[in-house]
Image (cartoon, grey):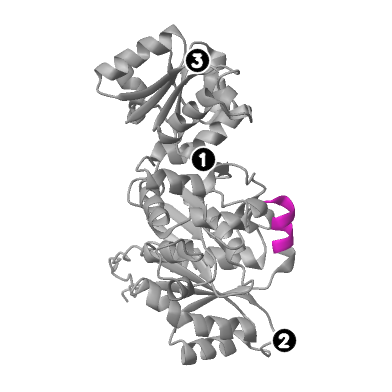
Amino acid sequence: MRVVVAGGARGRALAEDLRMEGVEVIAVVAATAPAAVVADATVDAAAAGLVAALSSADVLVVDADRAALTAALVAACDRFGVRIVARCTRASDQRLAERFGVRAVDADAPAREVIDPAAGDSTRPVGRGRGRVIVVWGAAGSPGRTTLAIGLAAELARDGRRVALVDADSHAPSVALATGLADEGPGFAAACRQAARGALSVDELERISLPHGGVSVLTGINRPGRWPELSVERVQAALTVCRDWADDVVVDVAASLELDEEIVSDLDGPRRNAATLGALRVADLVVAVVAADPVGISRFVRAHSELRAVIGATPVRILVNKTRPGVLGLDPRTQVRRAIERYAGAGEMWFAPADARAVDAALLSAQPVLRAAGRSALTAAIRRFVGEALEPPPPPPSPRRRRRRPSRRPVAPRV
């Protein structure tokens, strides 16, 4: 482990204790030096050396002071994949560390406690371990992947399970916009960077996630141009750690499954669809969203074989969304079922209606459909799908045998 210590005399004393514990201390700087380097655009030799030390460090130990612990420093450490440990002397320091979501320790804490991530006291509950990854995928177009992913996560969290919602869409991420959360935070890209360094933990996921109702959200990239940050190895490693973090991890991915980049180039470079392919390969269950119109059904049928080639024997639950009469005749469910059974070989499927009013209410309030329109037909369809396809209800108790009571026939009076 490589550590940078920021502080005066106490920082130098802590550095000596860390070295005695066998920790590699690569730099000991002034308390406000990291924050000043991040805020100042000019780079001299000393500043360049500190930036290089931060980029190669695993942990930054800094005082929980407003001049030393800043938002710019936290954002820079997230980009570098550096975990921050804030040393607190007052209650206000503790509140400052909690506001930035960094781990807080006492200023006089021993060196072993400072560098031990398991020593942090996390107040949020964590999953029961080895949770399942549910990937929400759909063919090209707008079948409603993000709306249904948010709704499924909210419904799964109703029973008290620990649920995480991950935006792994490398083409058009929209979970942050649909939930009203800031997309400037670290999010899933920071989790992938930490996973690549082997430094991602449950505590770190707690820090970089954003709460939304009863769901912990890892927002996606805020610019599509950042897609090289989501490689296959990083995505798979991050989702593996997420299994220990939550009971159910709902992942929203893009539609494209092509591997054209590997055909036009022999180099092992980044792949635009790596996030989708990586998430699908580690999924325990895939929810395939189909738009109930001729174009949506045709696109799903053509992409179904590619999906099967990627996921193998992973179970797939088909959810036909935006079902409405008119475009497919008076009985759209039968028409969709026959087409998918004939051309895709899939038999079991569920249906969700085209409920524009409920979707508009959810977008307007930045809430899941289940909260914005709890009595809508779309909400009822999502709950039915979760109960039957994702979380089957427990079997009914076996009926008890009732004892037959001897029938009391009226006794005829004696004559």
Residue marked by disc 2: 326
Residue stretch rendered in magenta on the structure? 359-366
- Give the left or right position of residue 170, taking residue 376 as reference: left
Q: Are marks 2 and 1 in contact (CB under 8 Å)?
A: no
- Give the left or right position of residue 24, taking residue 67 as reference: left
Marks 2 and 1, how far apart in space? 50 Å
N-terminal of the pair, mark 3 or mark 1, is 3
Q: Amino acid at mark 2?
A: Gly
Neighbour class for label 2 at 10 Å: few (<14), some, many (≥20)? few
Q: Nearer the viewer, residue 374 or 322?
A: 322
Residue 102 coordinates in the image, percent (x, y)? 49, 29
Neighbour class for label 1 at 10 Å: few (<14), some, many (≥20)? some
Q: Are marks 3 and 1 in contact (CB under 8 Å)?
A: no
Say which of marks 3 and 1 sits in front: 3
Q: Nearer the viewer, residue 9 or 243?
A: 9
Q: Amino acid at mark 3?
A: Ala
Q: Main secondary structure of the magenta part?
A: helix
On whether residue 364 falls in the magenta region, the answer is yes
Q: Quadrant of the N terminus?
A: top left
- The residue located at (31%, 25%) in the rendering is 24
> With respect to residue 124, does 154 lie above or below?
below
Say whether residue 53 is visible: yes
Q: Are marks 3 and 2 in contact (CB under 8 Å)?
A: no
Residue marked by disc 3: 30
- Give the left or right position of residue 78, taking residue 177 as reference: left
Q: Amino acid at mark 1?
A: Arg
Residue 207 coordinates in the image, percent (x, y)? 49, 36
Residue marked by disc 1: 79
Q: Nearer the viewer, residue 131 or 106?
A: 106
Which element is circle 1 on?
A: helix
